[in-house]
Amino acid sequence: MTLNVRIALNRPLRRLFDYLSPAGISLAPGQRVRVPFGRQSAIGLVVETDTPTPDTFTLKTVEQPLEDWPALPPETLTLLKWAARYYHHPLGECLFMALPPALRRGRAAERKSEPLWQASGHLDDIPKRARRQRELWQWLSECEAPQATAMVLAQGFSRSQLNSLSKGGQIKESDTRTTRAGNETAAVADLPVLTGHQQEALNTIPTPDAGFTTTLLYGITGSGKTEVYLHYLHQHLADDSQALVLVPEINLTPQTVARFRRYFGHRIVVWHSALNDSERLETWLRVRHGEPVILVGTRSATLLPFTRLATLVVDEEHDSSYKQGEGFRYSARDVAVYRGHLNQCPVILGSATPSLESVHNALSDKYHLVKLEQRAGKARPPEIRLLDVRSRPLEGGLSRPALAEIQRCLDNGQQALVFVNRRGYAPVMMCFDCGYMMECPRCDTRLTYHRRDRAMRCHHCDYQTAATEHCPKCHSDAFKPIGQGTERTEDVLSEQFPDTPVVRVDRDSTQRKGSIDNILKQVNSGAPCILVGTQMLAKGHDFANVTLVIVVNADGGLFSVDFRAPEQLIQTLIQVSGRAGRGELAGRVVVQTCHSDHPLLNALCQGQYLPIARQMLAEREASQLPPFQAMAIVRTEATTMAASLAFLDQAKALASEANLELWGPLPAVIARRADRHRAQLVLLSPGRKVLAQTLSQLTLALDQQRLPAGLRWQIDVDPLETG
């Protein structure tokens, strides 16, 4: 008997497609299939089986199943169906997010066998100038067993180094092959001994025997939350179970992986966007086939098809990187919590500056609150003081007292960190004769001057043009950079301290593969240096010899139109302050500001986040803003602003019947980006259920409308940016 099946395709369509099963073949939900779609073939995922036969048209037949097993197991399928409903996004696109790119394109779900490498010949056969090749030979010679290519690459070596040694005969392939990401014989180190406070926190976290629980581990910077994660997994994760550890940024992944691999060996696997297609497929297959891995990954790792998931850890749970900014706008933190509910396993959310939503849930007893308020070892929280820079001369954004602090730090053989939350040399180029400021021709924003590349760049649409020394409007030579970026501060510090290395860490300086590792290696050597960087430096790094942090400008988020700006500002300042004094030496933090009397900044000097969070929650409650109301935003972009606003007017009319508070429609803060005109309609409701029902009805009605050419719209549930 031929059965009907309902298929999801990777298309932005809020519907599924009915097909006939191939004769004699039984399909299962979650299975990958190839189907005819128009004049082409497409990869689909089975969502339902044995569906009713339509009366009005004849169904096409599935061409073939791509595997005889479901790519998405039942629990993952349930999770993604929930996420599609909650975030009001097309189910097909949500389901395909759980597949690696290779499987989305139809590649076979099979592992490639890899050669195992072992040292042969002699070290003297390798030229001394080939330093990395010699290091690779030495590493292979010290390994107890042959190593797979993936493991060699994970150690920071390259394929070219591997190939050169292979051609020269200094290494050779082993007689065996492997289909694993490494071999399992590597030695595992003993876990670090916990302090009394860490042990107390560990004992307070509910064990897996309690089923589903969510714990908010509030640990101040440097308190050793990672050690608590390590001990929890070591004590409670069974040998045949899987665990997921989420980190917010790719740049944090290598450090976290190295730390976890030291104690769990090759049970550790990784998942992030910098992996190539083969590496992602290999990791995906290990997860899907139930191997007892501990996966360290970024946002999308929470969607992978785990079959034995027993523990979830979300490190730096407050970080905005966990929220997808385009397309399927899910929150990996919130999806992880729901996944823990489905798997009936513990979820640990860790942060020194937890989100107000998580603090609210902890204070409402929805989450267990575990506090870790002492730094590990002999380290103590840094002293934070405000430096009012009104009427003070600034050089590269730095005042003379700040430069004197840096000099004192270097004289003591220590390291300093200067936090500048802007890339480039200067955010604005302005003519002092006619007042002209160079703007992006495609966006409602100004171009940033990058002096290293002699370029003017837009950080919103990537538009770029050559920099000029003369005003494009009046041709005056009084065309000068205004404001500070990391490049400008780096130049000033290099001039002021010519004998000290100045290391810049931002998106521009870390584009090359391995660049962040080289930077961290230099800093971790402990030699005196000055770090200059953006928020990349504020997250999770442990620099034992950094004793001074200078915040160039703390005023950016004090007067923003976004109601979340104060929360994000205080989180950033506390996180970057926490880089100081993590070793045995005391740390100091100097925060430059023009508003030293601001209550939020003065509260920062007390060094306690939870009291500040409670105060901000009280303000949110008085204003009836999230988390005390549920929020969603309907966002549009079109070729004209009139088209965007007209579409949102229709959406507002459809939503106005519900018991909702509506803001707008209004242009976005950056109303034009990449020649697209952006507007938004904000929906607020005291009850999440009412908001969800309204959004479901709204999406159904809007999908039936004929859209103007070039107009796109999407819904953002629980938005982190309201501008």
Image (cartoon, rainbow, N blue to C red):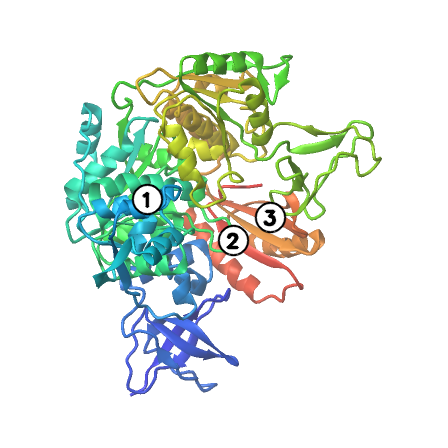
Q: Residue 377 falls in which quadrant of the image?
A: top left
> Between disc 2 and disc 1, whose residue precedes?
1
Residue 57 image point, x, y percent: 47, 86
Q: Position of residue 667 (x, y in %)?
A: 65, 45
User: Quadrant location of residue 483?
Assistant: top right
Element type where label 1 sits in the image: helix
Residue 105 location (% of width, % of height) = 43, 68
Label 2, label 1: how far apart the Cα atoms are? 54 Å
Q: Which residue is mark 2?
A: 715
Residue appearing at x 63%, y 67% in the figure: 706
Residue 485, visible in the rendered structure: no
| Between 305 and 100, the one nearer to me in the picture | 100
Q: Is residue 679 above or below residue 702?
A: above
Q: Is residue 677 above or below residue 608?
A: below
Sequence-wise, which precedes: disc 3 or disc 2? Answer: 3
> Which residue is depicted at the point 42% across and 25% down?
574
- From the image, which quarter does the N terminus lie in? bottom left
- Residue type at tag 2: Ile
Quadrant holding the C terminus: top right
Q: What element does badge 2 sit on?
A: strand
Q: How far apart, in angstroms, are the residues tagged by discs 3 and 2?
A: 10 Å
Distance between the alpha carbons at the discs numbered 3 and 1: 58 Å
Q: Position of residue 404 (x, y in %)?
A: 52, 12
Give the secondary structure at mark 3: strand
* Residue 263 visible in the shown view: yes
Q: Which mark is residue 680?
A: 3
Q: Which residue is mark 1?
A: 134
Q: Nearer the viewer, residue 390 or 106?
A: 106
Q: Residues within 10 Å of mark 2 (few under 14, many from 20)?
A: many
Query: Mark 3 against mark 1, which lies toward the viewer?
Result: 1
Residue type for callout 3: Gln
